[in-house]
Image (spheres, rainbow, N blue to C red):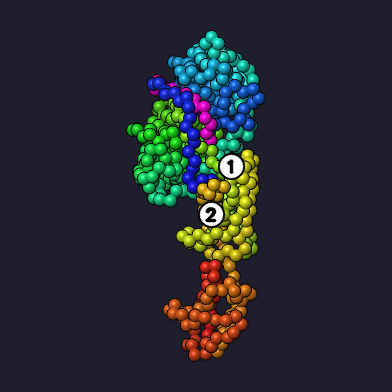
């Protein structure tokens, strides 16, 4: 809930991945400091050996060609290795802790191509297909253990869905909008080291390169790709590597993602997506895949210690609903830390924002918290709302903007209408009225003041149609027609 996304304390124990074959899966090295993509302790079974930092977490099934994983991998469904040339390694090159639970397959392991799987650390599995040999281990480097729910996958997907929605609910950093030209995504900052949020709607589905302009290295970067189908395809180097430690790619709406010759430099959060991988693609950072991975050739998930922190407030929803002449707002958080309050702000045109009220935050919470606020005097037309989320130390962040549209009845009654000599104006609450104007058909103001319950003379006006314009002190403007006989 900071004005900018907090930067995570620097991870330790980073291991640089070696070169791997073209047709490989590589998840290298582990970090010891948790970040948002770490599996929370609540989803690790009692006695789990090692922390929740995995290079790859696949909630569904993982089907792969030949490959190697230098780091730790957790699969909620089945793991199928279709290698005809090489085996599969987990934790060997990165020297993952030999006592750690480093390879988890909650479903069935299938591997019948004759090449062995080598694991450094423990391998937990739900079942093994009849002709599949179990992985081998070096002396004293772990064991094969038949057991499910070492990682508790029930509820884990929803945890990442909530996290993804919380990222997507963050307001974009003020500045130039992301530019997409010929599949090249250009993200522009203000040349200061800070944290940036970009919300990207692709006109097509493809990204071939990602460029950073006036964003210094050391800045935190959250890139929300909002499309449902996304292709990351490139024949050249699509990203520079200097930003990877503090960059997260978030795909809150994606159901299908294609990777082909694209090197993603940063964390990868796709809690609803199936991922298809072709032609030696890399994800250099922790990857969370909520669906299945189908990797024909060359998906490499490499280690990068993510310096991107848990958000102090994870806002997972912010909605507004018109009920009569009241705008009812509701929002939810899934966790809060050092949170103070929410200030509800409104704008009629998106330029001048006015504080409408405050709602106290829970402060410290690790469960879903729900909040409501009623705007009982909305504007006529489009009402824009946002939340200013304040911490106890005075720092703040904004939510995304939502809209509630109202077609309100006039707050003033004018009679008689049609009129001959006089028109009388009445209002339930005249204190709310700023100005009353009678306008000609050309827009000229014929009267600029009126008093509640008192008549104005219109006998000298030509016959015709006139417009009564009422401006309230809160900025609300309404009109009604007056016929002069």
On screen, residue 223 above or below 402? above
Looking at the rendered structure, the secondary structure element under dot 2 is strand
385 left or right of 300?
A: right
Q: Does residue 304 sit above or below 202 in this rendering?
A: above
At x 45%, y 43%, the residue is 195
On whether residue 30 falls in the magenta region, the answer is yes
Q: Nearer the viewer, mark 1 or mark 2?
A: 1
| SS at mark 1 in the image | loop
Q: Residue furthest front?
A: 393
Q: Look at the picture and state if 28 lies above or below 198.
A: above
Q: Main secondary structure of the magenta part?
A: loop
> Which disc is residue 370 wearing?
none
Q: Which residue is disc 1 drawn over?
A: 337
Q: What's drawn in magenta, residue-wise?
A: 20-36
State the image quarter where residue 86 is shown: top left
Residue placed at 55% from the left, 21% from the top? 102
Give above or below for 293 relative to 231: above
Observer-nearest residue: 370 or 268?
A: 370
Q: Position of residue 111 (x, y in %)?
A: 53, 17
Place of residue 176 in the rendered image (x, y in percent of width and height, measured from the top left): 39, 50
Image quarter of residue 128: top right
**Any part of residue 274 in sight:** no
The residue that label 2 is drawn on is 386
Could you say which quadrant of the image residue 98 lies in?
top right
Q: Residues within 10 Å of mark 1 (few under 14, many from 20)?
A: some
Q: Residues within 10 Å of mark 2 (few under 14, many from 20)?
A: many
């Amino acid at each position: 809930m900071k004005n900018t996304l907090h930067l995570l304390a620097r991870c330790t124990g980073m291991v640089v991945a070696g070169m791997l074959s073209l047709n490989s899966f590589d998840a290298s090295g582990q970090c010891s400091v948790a970040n948002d993509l770490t599996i929370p302790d609540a989803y690790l079974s009692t006695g789990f050996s090692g922390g929740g930092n995995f290079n790859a977490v696949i909630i569904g099934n993982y089907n792969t060609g030949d490959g190697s994983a230098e780091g730790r991998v957790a699969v909620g469904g089945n793991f199928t290795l279709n290698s005809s040339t090489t085996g599969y390694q987990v934790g060997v090159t990165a020297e993952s802790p030999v006592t750690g639970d480093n390879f988890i397959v909650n479903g069935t392991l299938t591997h019948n191509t004759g090449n062995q799987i080598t694991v450094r650390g423990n391998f937990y599995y739900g079942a093994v297909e009849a002709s599949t040999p179990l992985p081998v281990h070096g002396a004293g480097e772990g064991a094969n253990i038949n057991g499910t729910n070492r990682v508790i996958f029930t509820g884990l997907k929803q945890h990442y869905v909530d996290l993804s929605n919380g990222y997507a609910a963050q307001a974009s950093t003020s500045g130039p909008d992301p530019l997409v030209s010929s599949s090249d995504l250009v993200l522009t900052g203000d040349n200061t080291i800070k944290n940036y949020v970009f919300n990207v709607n692709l006109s097509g589905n493809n990204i071939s390169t990602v460029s950073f302009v006036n964003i210094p290295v050391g800045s935190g970067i959250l890139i929300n790709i909002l499309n449902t189908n996304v292709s990351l395809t490139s024949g050249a180097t699509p990203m520079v590597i200097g930003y990877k430690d503090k960059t997260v790619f978030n795909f809150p709406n994606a159901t299908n993602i294609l990777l082909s010759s694209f090197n993603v430099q940063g964390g990868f959060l796709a809690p609803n997506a199936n991922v298809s991988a072709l032609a030696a693609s890399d994800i250099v950072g922790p990857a969370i895949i909520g669906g299945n991975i189908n990797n024909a050739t060359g998906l490499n998930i490499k280690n990068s210690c993510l310096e991107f922190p848990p958000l102090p407030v994870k806002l997972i929803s912010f909605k507004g609903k018109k009920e009569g002449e009241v705008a009812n707002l509701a929002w939810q958080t899934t966790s809060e830390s050092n949170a103070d309050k929410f200030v509800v702000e409104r704008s009629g045109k998106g330029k001048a924002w006015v504080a409408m009220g405050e709602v106290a935050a829970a402060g410290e919470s690790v469960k879903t918290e729900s909040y409501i606020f009623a705007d009982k005097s909305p504007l006529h037309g489009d009402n824009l709302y946002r939340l200013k989320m304040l911490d106890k130390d005075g720092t703040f962040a904004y939510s995304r903007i939502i809209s509630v549209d109202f077609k309100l009845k006039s707050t003033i009654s004018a009679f008689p209408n049609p009129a001959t000599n006089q028109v009388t104006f009445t209002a339930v609450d005249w204190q709310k009225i700023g100005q009353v104007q009678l306008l000609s058909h050309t827009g000229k103001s014929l009267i600029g003041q009126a008093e509640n319950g008192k008549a104005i003379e219109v006998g000298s006006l030509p016959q015709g149609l006139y417009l009564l314009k009422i401006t309230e002190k809160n900025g609300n403007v309404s009109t009604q027609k007056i016929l002069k006989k």
